Each structure stands twice: as C-alpha cells, then as structure tokens.
C-alpha cells in the first residue's frame, strides 16, 4: 500500500469552522421557533373568528321560528317599542323600568317579541341537554353548553352550589338584550330569560349578590 504523504493536519477539520457551523445551526433553530410561535397565534385568532361565526349561525338557526314575531305596539320584529306605544305594552298601573346596569329579570318592554320567542327556543334545547347530565359540575355544564354551540366567552358566572351548577348566557345580538339564567340540576334543571344592558360588557355581579 502506498503510504500517505500528506500530513494528518491536512485532513483534519479546524475547530473554529465547527464552532461557526454550530452557531449558525442554533440561529436557524431559533428562527424556526419564532416562526412557529407566530403561526400558533394566527391559528388562535382564526379559531376564535370561526367560533364566533358558528355561534352567530347557531343563534340565527335557533331564532328561525321567531322571524315573524311582532308586537302590535312595536315596529318591525326585533325592535323595542318606543314612545307612548312602548308604554302601552306595560301592565296596567306599571311604570317604565329604569335602564339596568346588570342583567336582571326581563319585562315586556325590555325584550322584543323576537327575543321572547328566541328565549323559549334556547331554554328548551338547554334544559333538554342538561337534564341528561348526571352530577352537573361546572366543567360538565360548560362542555354540554359548548356542544350546543354556546361559546366560552358567552358563558358567565359558572359556579356550583351544592348539587346545582348555575350559569348565565349572553345571547345579545342585533341590538337585542336577551340573556338566560340557568340552574343545572339533572331532572330539575331550569333556565329562565333575563335582560342584559343593550351595550357594553356582560356582568352578573349584581345577580350573584342577590342570590338569583
């Protein structure tokens, strides 16, 4: 065999280039991670927008039987009565309610016919679903509501009181003020309509303090 004439140093990799390669690889890895994080944030935003769209579709579908609901003293469906006509819709001897700053029990003047009708549709489907939930914890109730199309940001005040889990749903849309107050308790589950502020954030602090 012919002996190798070149010195061993000629075939050895210098240490400095190896360090440079390692640093380059590390920098590329860092860039890759940054890109991945950015795409994750974009995915969350897309998912949120998709959930909002699906929620809006669900609200329209539930309220579909209510599209022709009108009140003789009001304008087109979905509009609240105003002026003397709105006052005529109150019970005899009643007075116009003050503008609430928290959700509360609704009056005829505060919810349109469409909202009243939609509330019945929501209550029926929610009660039917929650009656099938044994030992309804807040987690189970949230999961059941999510399955019906109610998104997390519209579910408020989930709390357990003994064997009952209470919650509120913000169902405001198209200028309406509808919300629902629920008590999940198996066969004794109950859901009733409530009225929320026409604009602004949804709060249940006053209702919680009143024990309702």
Image (cartoon, rainbow, N blue to C red):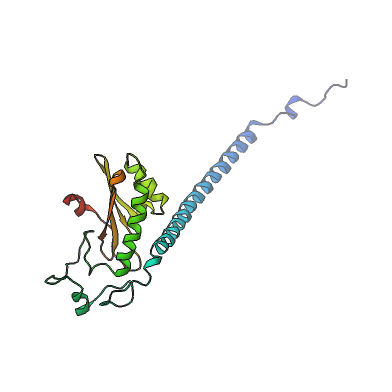
> Which residue lies most toward the bottom here?
84
Residue 124 quadrant: bottom left
Could you tell me how many numbered marks the image carries?
Answer: 0
Residue closest to the far top = 1
Identify which residue, 53 or 9, lies in the foreground. Answer: 53
Residue 158 in view in this figure: no
Residue at the left extreme? 93
Would you place residue 112 above or below residue 44 in this image? below
Q: Is residue 134 left or right of residue 93?
A: right
Query: For the point 20% across and 50% down, which residue is it?
Result: 208
Residue 109 versus residue 155: which sits nearer the camera? Answer: 109
Q: Is residue 50 left or right of residue 170?
A: right
At horizontal 41% and vertical 54% (from top left) the residue drawn is 149
**Residue 15 appears in the picture as rendered:** yes
Image quarter of residue 141: top left
Which residue is most to the right? 1
Q: Nearer the viewer, residue 97 or 121?
A: 121
62 is higher (above) or lower (below) than 30: below
Q: Position of residue 207 (x, y in %)?
A: 20, 53
Instruction: Give the position of the N terminus as an image quadrant.
Output: top right
Tell me residue 70's x, y (percent): 31, 74
Residue 207 placement, left or right of 140: left
Give coordinates of residue 126: x percent, y percent: 35, 52
Q: Residue at x 25, y 63 (%)?
A: 197
**Residue 179 found in image quarter:** bottom left
x and y percentages locating residue 100 in the rendered image:
20, 63
């Amino acid at each position: 065999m012919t002996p190798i004439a070149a010195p061993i140093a000629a075939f050895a990799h210098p240490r400095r280039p190896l360090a440079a390669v390692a640093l380059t690889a590390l920098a590329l890895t860092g860039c890759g991670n940054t890109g991945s994080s950015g795409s994750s944030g974009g995915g969350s935003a897309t998912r949120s927008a998709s959930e909002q769209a699906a929620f809006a579709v669900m609200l329209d579908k539930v309220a579909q039987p209510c599209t022709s609901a009108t009140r003789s003293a009001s304008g087109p469906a979905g509009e609240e009565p105003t002026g003397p006509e709105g006052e005529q819709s109150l019970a005899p001897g009643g007075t116009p309610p003050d503008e609430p700053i928290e959700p509360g029990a609704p009056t005829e003047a505060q919810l349109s016919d469409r909202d009243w009708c939609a509330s019945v549709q929501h209550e029926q489907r929610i009660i039917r679903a929650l009656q099938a939930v044994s030992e309804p914890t807040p987690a189970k109730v949230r999961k059941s509501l999510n399955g019906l199309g109610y998104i997390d940001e519209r579910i408020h005040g989930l709390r357990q009181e003994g064997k009952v889990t209470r919650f509120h749903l913000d169902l405001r849309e198209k200028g309406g003020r509808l919300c629902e107050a629920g008590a999940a308790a198996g066969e004794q589950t109950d859901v009733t309509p409530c009225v929320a502020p026409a604009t602004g954030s949804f709060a249940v602090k006053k209702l919680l303090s009143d024990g309702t």
